[in-house]
Amino acid sequence: MSNSGHGRRTSRRTLLRGLALGAAGAALGAGAAIGAGAAIGARGARAAEAAQTSKVDVHDPQAVALGYVENASQVDTKKYPQYAPGSDCDNCLQLQGKPGNNYRPCTLFSGKLVAVAGWCSGWTAEM
């Protein structure tokens, strides 16, 4: 009978050792998955940042529809009589991002940057 008891102890030890190794492996696997997720997240953030850094093309259909120009002095005042000298993207409510940058995000051009010296018919005075 002592042989069968000894067999159980060995079996229990083996089981506990296996559980401990399995738990350690699971923890390492989870850490690797989190690391991979972080890498994918970082790539996604870089892609979003890259998309955010592309400037609005003045020939883009939305830009044309809004009369966007990169330099407010080039606004066609006959076509856009609401333009007032001194109104530009830099003092527009739609402009976002950090002051001091020459190109910043605009709520009207999702994912694109506009020139702070620019203007479009969506210009709204800052409050």
Image (spheres, rainbow, N blue to C red):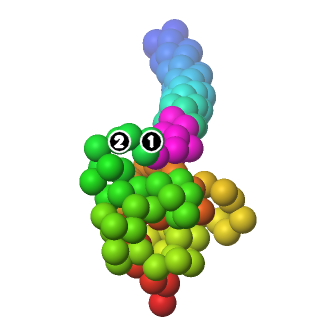
What amino acid is labelled 2 in the image?
Asp
Q: Residue visible at 58% across and 70% down?
A: 90
Q: Residue visible at 38% across and 40% down?
A: 59
Indicate which disc residue 91 carries: none
Q: Find disc 1 in the rendering and name its residue.
A: 57
Pick the front one: 12 or 20: 20
The magenta region covers: 47-56
Residue with the most extreme right position: 100
Residue 103, position in %: x, y?
Answer: 60, 54
Q: Are marks 1 and 2 in contact (CB under 8 Å)?
A: yes
What amino acid is labelled 1 in the image?
Asp
Residue 27, position in %: x, y?
Answer: 57, 33
- Check if residue 50 falls in the magenta segment: yes
Q: Is residue 76 above or below residue 48?
A: below
Q: Find disc 2 in the rendering and name its residue.
A: 60
Residue 97, quarter of the rendered image: bottom right
Q: Can you see residue 54?
A: yes
Residue 18, quarter of the rendered image: top right
Q: Residue visible at 72% across and 65% down?
A: 100
Q: Residue visible at 56% across and 78% down?
A: 86
